[in-house]
Amino acid sequence: MVEPYEIIIRGARLRGYDLSKRYDVAISDGRIAEIKEHIPEHGEREIDAKGRLVVPSFYNMHFHLDSVLTLGDPKFNESGTLWEGIAIWAEYKKRISVEDVLRRVEEFVKWSVVNGVTYIRTHADCTEKTLTGVKALIRARDEFKDLIDIQVTAFPQDGILTEPDNAEYLRKAVEMGADNVGMIPHNEYTREDAVESIKIAFEIAKEFNRDVDGHVDETDDPISRNLEVVAKYTLKYGWVGRVTAGHVTASHSWDPAYRYRILPLIRKAGITIIANPLINIYLQGRFDTYPKRRGMAPIKMYLENGINVTLGHDCVLDPWYPLGTGNMLHALFMAIHVDQMMGWSDLFKALDLITVNAAKAWRKGAEQYGLAKGKRADLLILNALTDVDALRNLEPPLYVIRHGKLIADNTAPERQYKIYYKGKWETIDLNFKKALNK
């Protein structure tokens, strides 16, 4: 007797396939077992997609889980600037605890999953001397592994050389188990310190065999050119394809001659650019009157020059960003508007920025990701017929399947979002109740 498939999705449109046709997708043992126009066998669970679009699940490639959902504590950021946010966070992290971080992360992870995000790369501030955030996020990576895959980047928020012990704290965070080595060269005191900080990050990465994931040139200053140094050390240390550069907003202001020189070097180094459209369009350009710069890495320019680009949400309800639910379609929606990526063919490539491009930068298990037989069954059934509908509607998926298991069902009436966690279904509320006390 042939064992039934665990799940069969019936009558779906599949991203990357002929959208005029409908397909059945069979899932067993955590993987896609078959994709056919009709699968005659039955499944233990059958989901009628009704022609809706199935895509691989989403990535959030740049985020700060240690600060998520802290908005208003100890106060709200009234200026809306990066600098006031940093000052507020400096106050908050004086009393941060592992339990506090885990409580907030658990809530946000559930928000992410109902929004179709099953991969988050988070930065953990390792200039907080007790490394409490690092400890908490390493624990979160393990405690919530049944819901989501988390990578932790050891992030020297205040700089590697701005304090005597910060380089050692960075090293210790990686030794504790952080997945990636971070940096923030534009936050160092001098250009010379910036270059040295990049070298230190690569030396630690090589010592522990970790990828490098830096905040790089998150400024409007066009002569903040640390990315070229990152590319140099990527080649020097043989880390090609193992480096991501987050934000890179200075590249929006590069002059054409410099772009001509630097873009081939970035491509040669195999660096992935991680743009953060929501927060950078909000935080950058603060010294401009009008005209005001858009303040986001020029995604289209990088893509046209053969450089991989993916996206992060960066922050949700914290000192730097007062909105968000973790829906990566919101970040993507902002990106395609800001960078004018809405030609008809552009719209059908846009989801790459939060799916296949992200998997390439994530690296671990990337070969198992995708919509094909034998791939890991991390799938979303969207309430959309095409990529264009997904971008128009910006809705959470109808269903989320992770490692072959149905973990979110958003089909209940009155926009109820439900997640399967610890052996039972629970309803998720995406409202931020702290605002009721404002």
Image: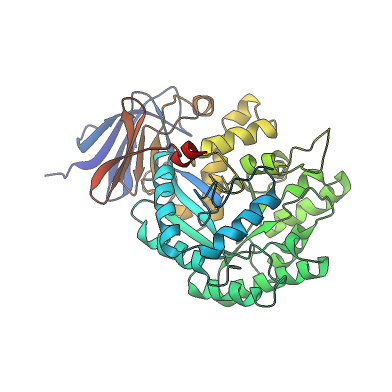
> As drawn, which residue projects farthest toward the left?
1
Q: Which quadrant of the rendered structure holds the N terminus?
A: top left
Residue sitting nearer the eye, 59 or 113: 113
In the picture, measured across the screen, residue 354 lies left or right of residue 78, that is left
Vertical placement of residue 63 versus 163, above or below:
above
> As drawn, which residue projects farthest toward the right?
257
Q: Is residue 212 in sight in this rendering?
A: yes
Residue sitting nearer the eye, 175 or 166: 166
Write the residue at 39% across / 26% down.
52
In the picture, measured across the screen, residue 155 lies left or right of residue 110, that is right
Q: How is the image coloured?
A: rainbow
- Please tell me how many numbered marks the rendered image carries: 0
Write the residue at 69% across / 59% down.
269
The spot of residue 314 in percent (x, y) is: 58, 48
> As drawn, which residue projects farthest toward the front?
437
Q: Quadrant of residue 164?
A: bottom right
Vertical placement of residue 20 versus 87, above or below:
above
Q: Is residue 124 in sight in this rendering?
A: no
Residue sitting nearer the eye, 285 or 388: 285
The spot of residue 354 in percent (x, y) is: 54, 42
Vertical placement of residue 214 versus 327, above or below:
below
Write the residue at 61% across / 60% down.
90
In the picture, measured across the screen, residue 109 lies left or right of residue 262, that is left
In the picture, measured across the screen, residue 349 lies left or right of residue 20, that is right
The spot of residue 189 in percent (x, y) is: 79, 66
The spot of residue 209 in percent (x, y) is: 55, 72
Q: Quadrant of residue 40?
A: top left
